Every structure is written in C-alpha cells, then in structure tokens.
Amino acid sequence: MKNKLFPALGVLILISLFVLGACKGRDSEDSELNGPSEVYTGDSFEIRYCSKWHPQAQFSGIYMALEKGFYAQHGLDVKIQKVLQSDAALDSLESGALDVIHLDLLAALQVNADSFRVVNICQIAQRNPVLLVGKRSRGINSISDFAGKKIGVWRTGSNLSTYAFLEDHDLSMEIIPIDWSISLFTEDAVDVINIMCYNEYHQLLLSGIKEEDLFVVDLNALGYSVPDEGLYVTPEFYKAHPEECQNFASATIDGWFYAFSHIQETVSVVLERMRKANIKANKTLQHEMLNEMKKIVLPSTSEIGILKEEDYLRALELLYKMSELQIEMKYEDFYPHATE
C-alpha cells in the first residue's frame, strides 16, 4: 500500500506549527502558515465544491484554504456552492454541475453498490464521531437499558453504524427518524439519540443538560471505527484531472492545519459564513466543534487526508454484514491515490 500523498506535507507543516506555537503561544493568531513555497502563476482551474451540511466549523479546512489563498497557490479557483441533500449533490456531481462533494464513507460505498459512481480523493475524518446518548433520568444507565426504548436515528447520513450496533447487541428499539435536531431528545420524546461528538453533544450541554446526567456510548471505542466524511469526485473527473484533485486535497489539508493553529481567527471566519447563510451562529459551540474536529481530522500527521486500507475494509465488512452491498470493490479503485 502506497499511502504517500500527504504525510511528508503534514510533517513539514506540523513542524512549522510547533515552532510558531513556541513563539506565539497555544493559539498563534498573529502567525502565518503560507502554504506551498511555490506560488502558482498560470491559469486557474475552477472547482465547484459542495459540503454535506450548512456552514459550520465542521468544514473549517475548506473555509481557511479559501480564505488564506491555499487553493489559489495550488492553481485552483474554488467555488463553494449552495448546500444540497446528498442525493441531489450526487446527481449534480454526475451531471457535471459540481466537481467535488462531501460524503460519508459508508454512504459513498453504498452509492457504488452497482458501479463506481464516486471515488475518494481525500479522507477528512479518521474516526467515527457518532455517539449514542441516553438520559439517566429516563432509565438509561447501561447498554442493556436501551432495550424497548425509543431511539432517534438520522433519516440519512451516518446512521448505519448505529443500526449495526443495535443488531449486534440484539437491541429491539422503536426507531424514530430525526432530521439533525436534538429537540425530540430534550423534550423526552425519545430516550436515546444518535449524535455527533463534535456537534449535537455540545448542543445538549449548552441546552442545560449536565454530562453526569447522560449515558454515552462511543461507537468508535466499541469497534465501530469507520470514519465518516471525505471528499469525492466522479471516476471520470479524477481520470481527466488527477493533478487538480491532488492539489485540491493538499490545499484543503493546508487549510485544516491553519485552522487548528488559528482557532479564534477560524471561528470568526466560520461565524461570518454562518451569518451570511442566515444560519443561527453560536460562538461557543463553533469553538468546541473545531476543537473536537482536530481529534477527528488530525489524530496524527501520518494519517491526515488518507483513507487507510484497514478503515476501508472495515467499512466494507460492516456493509456486507448489513446486506447493503452485493459486489466486490477494490481499495485501489475506490481510492486511486493509493496507487500513486
């Protein structure tokens, strides 16, 4: 396996960040990460990108790569498009209206169930961020207490690991579809809810619920360690523009490194994007989200941006077990950077 696309870049940038941190302190707002040493001077290549959700710190790497000119330094003119539902984004990708979209790994593999429709050019997340949370006041003090209770599960997106967990533990629960809201949980309409560690968990705490009043199951810690979001293009787009795909991935990683070393600046950029999109913005939540994203995106510099083969195979195994896939898919076909 030849996962050599990003480690050297990551180590180089991280060394720079450590030096800056020693001089400026933990959050070096006055320091600069200049990106690639060679600035591109030719014609820019336009890339139309769409995230999987509304503006928030979850996509800070993209925002800061654009804000600090890292895409431009890689010869790219990146346009952030209006957020679409995953099916609509996929349709737009295949029609040529979009070039790069955000998808969860399991969702992307499902998309390819019949034929290769998308390929991964950069694996953003390196761990599964899904938590299952219950209220102790509702009698949830152990996993066995889930049985017979109501659980709120997302209609789409990162829900397969939740279903696999329930099946493996033989837990019969009433499934209540939710649309990325914690209101059913806070109002006791459901006893358990699946949430993201970097987002809804902090929303619960900000709503006034105390950590000690919650029973939390970390799916990643229990072996359901399938990372979620990555950047995807069509196989045809990758074949026609492999260098541009690599440059987009590299610049995005530059953006993440910058975001993690400039927390306050990044949160300000995120909040401004949220305001422009008429999205309710909470500075504390976005700050906590960015800190949590660092644990997910940057567990080590040797992994950032890479889809590891063991993670890919683990995701396939889960889908085969859930009868979501009937065909074989090679790692190198799904993640073409592996052969470079």
Image (cartoon, rainbow, N blue to C red):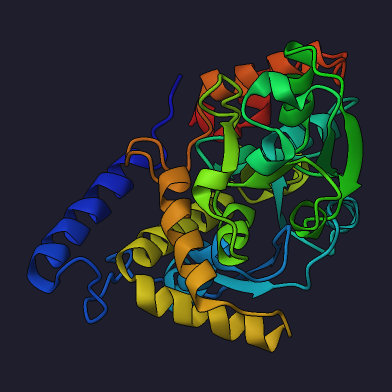
At a point 30% along the width and 65% down the height, the residue shown is 261
Q: Quadrant of residue 226?
A: top right
At horizontal 50% and vertical 37% (from top left) the residue drawn is: 126
Q: Residue at x 73, y 32 (%)?
A: 106
On the image, the x and y values in percent for residue 208 come to 59, 64
Q: Whole-percent x and y of residue 254?
A: 39, 60
Q: Is residue 70 left or right of residue 130?
A: left
Total labels: the figure holds: 0
Work out whether 109 lies above or below 195: above
User: Residue shown at 86%/58% (left/top)?
Assistant: 85
Residue 280 located left or right of residue 197: right
Q: Nearer the viewer, residue 24 or 151?
A: 151
- In the current view of this chain or complex, which residue is farthest to the left? 23
Residue 239 in sight in this render: no
Residue 315 locus on image (x, y percent):
67, 23
Q: Is residue 146 visible?
A: yes
Place residue 324 in its image quadrant: top right
Tell whether 310 sits left or right of 21.
right
Residue 250 pos. (x, y %): 45, 54
Whether 88 is drawn above or below 270: the answer is above
Which image quadrant is residue 323 in? top right
